[in-house]
Amino acid sequence: MSQSPKSREKCEISFTVNGKLETVHVHAMERLLDVLRHELGLTGTKEGCGEGECGSCSVLIDGMLVNSCLIPVLQANGTKIVTIEGLAADGRLQILQQAFLDCGGAQCGICTPGMILASLHLLEKKPQPTLEEIREGLSGNLCRCTGYMQIFDAVAEAARRGATA
Amino acid sequence: MRALPTEYELVAPRTLPDVLSLLAHEPGAWLPIAGGTDVMVQYSAGKLAARKLVSIWNLPELRSLEVMADEIQIGAGCTYTDLRAHEVILRELSLLSSSASWTGGIANQNRGTIGGNIVNASPAADSLPALMVYGAELLLVSARGERRVPYASFHISYRKTQLAPDELIRAICLKRQFSGYYAHARKVGARNAQAISKVCHAALGLLTDGVVDDIRLAMGSVAPVPIRLSETERIIRGRSIDPQLIRLARAAAAAEIRPIDDIRSTSRYRAAVAANLVGEFLEQLSVHGARSENSQKVLARWNGLQSDKAAEEILPCCGSKAWARGMTTRRPVLNEEALLAACDEVWRNLPESDWLEAYRSHPRIGDSHTPASAPVQSAAWSSAEQQKVRAAGEDVKAALAAGNREYEQKFNRIFIVCATGKSAPQILAILRRRLQNDEKTELHEAAEQQRQIAHLRLKKWLSS
């Protein structure tokens, strides 16, 4: 992390987003969420509550699940970020994304990118989670459509299909 | 109203001395921000008074977790995830691990720090009662030097602390002296994750010869600051737990707290819950405490035995001689938790041949003939473990026998499953699933089952 002596001026921030090195000129206190959406055009990351309660803005920073609405962009300098846009490759959905579709785990879609990143974070630590572990892993992500059951099914199905293998 | 980033300054010095010199230069002007789980919420809502922020996130000097002979020093910048992942904390300071597990969701646990939680000084913060009962001390650091203060006196009044404007918390110090204690934490809220507690509770108790030798009760969300229930503790200490003591303690707890009505709950409800939590803890303490007293007697005797006698006594819990010898080298073992942790570590590190020896000490599932070489105690335990299987119908028993034969042909050893509490049809389903495993997966699955069997047997041994 670097010193930014004139922080009310814009500062230069570099990080790797979905494998690609990006450099932006922004204010140090801008939220990572806004920089991803407005500077980089990565609008898959959603804003729900804006106070770390709903998980819609979840991304991975250096492999850790975080709420991007609570991260001043200066704290993301030099990190590796994964957003929902980084999952599908060569026109093919990642296993978790396909499982969410197959199990009806997505409806209006606002929570889905966060749900999928929280699920990915869980499966990377616990490739074969119990239902209790799935519920805990997603406890910071709110969904107002599905009633959660289809989402839990989708994560269990993705685990069976080897989502992080 | 949303905050404008242009109105704020944020700097991120690379080292702790750089941060401290900034704070010393303009005391009170800079607001430290670590994981941002509190500060950024105020910022986004346009309610953050400070205009100059200094990032202390991930400073190496604040992120270390040091285990010393008699003390654990947790860097103030350690996250809840760091706390939950730490084995010594899980074993010796379990109230911290459990309260960390219901603070926020996973994303907030990855960013929220223990130091930030203390300085934010919410009376409802879930991990603060745990720090109170463990008698934590805080290491405060500034450019002027370092001082150590008891956490119990850190909170002065609602959201006011002893922290000087140029100071940071560097570390939280906890003594390693709670091995024989029964520990219990509970959060009462709308849900565990993300919801702020109506009441949160942490408690430690030590029984000696049926008398409460030490008791420490703390609660959050029932006063302007997290509090110890000193008056309730005074009533309980030195007494044996009976219905009359529980009645007195419940009344004392309800009288001692100073709850308010707010959006989450009412003062009446909080007082009722506080009384219930103290009552619940005392009931559990009397059961667990008596059990742990007995365990300690068994362990004290076992710790004093000659190695070969000690190995012989513990062998039926597992069946592997190398495991039994390994366990004796872990002595003195002071309590059940340490015993189970030693069991896992010794078991995990054994070569395959010793695992196979343990498997051979069991009878087949559904078969009453324990191998002749197995100790008498092992045979008695096996019989009790397979109680439900014996009650099964003949068709299920026949299917199990066929499954056993198929398993033995495929893997060249007997099928091991932790049978306690499982019915014959459940075991049959597990057997059929595991027949699909490859050799390596199955060897480890059997080892996990054997580990569970050993835990149950060790607990039986401790209560003997």
Image: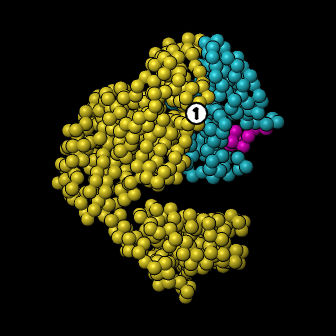
Chain colours: A cyan, B yellow
Residue B337 placed where, x, y %?
Answer: 45, 61
Query: Which residue is at a point 66% across and 68% down the rendered structure image?
Result: B443
Q: Residues within 10 Å of mark 1 (few under 14, many from 20)?
A: many
Work out whether residue A111 can be spotted: no
Q: Secondary structure at mark 1?
A: loop
Instruction: Say which residue appears at 31% left-offset and 57% top-offset.
Output: B206
Q: Residue furthest right?
A: A90
Q: Residue A97 in magenta?
A: yes
Q: Is residue A99 visible?
A: yes
Which portion, as a residue range, is magenta?
A92-101
- Report if residue B412 lies within the magenta region: no
State which chain disc 1 sits on.
B
Left or right of A29: which side holds B39? left
Of B303 and B433, the residue lying toward us: B303
Residue B260 in the figure: left or right of residue B353: left
Which residue appears at 71% of the width and 68% of the height?
Answer: B439
Quadrant of the image containing the C terminus of chain B: bottom left
Location of mark 1 (residue): B59
Mark 1 residue type: Leu
Horizontal and vertical percent position of residue B270:
29, 36
The rendered magenta stretch, by its main secondary structure, is classed as helix
Note whether A64 is above or below B14 in the view shown.
below
Quarter of image, res B372: bottom right
Residue B227 screen position, x and y as percent: 30, 37
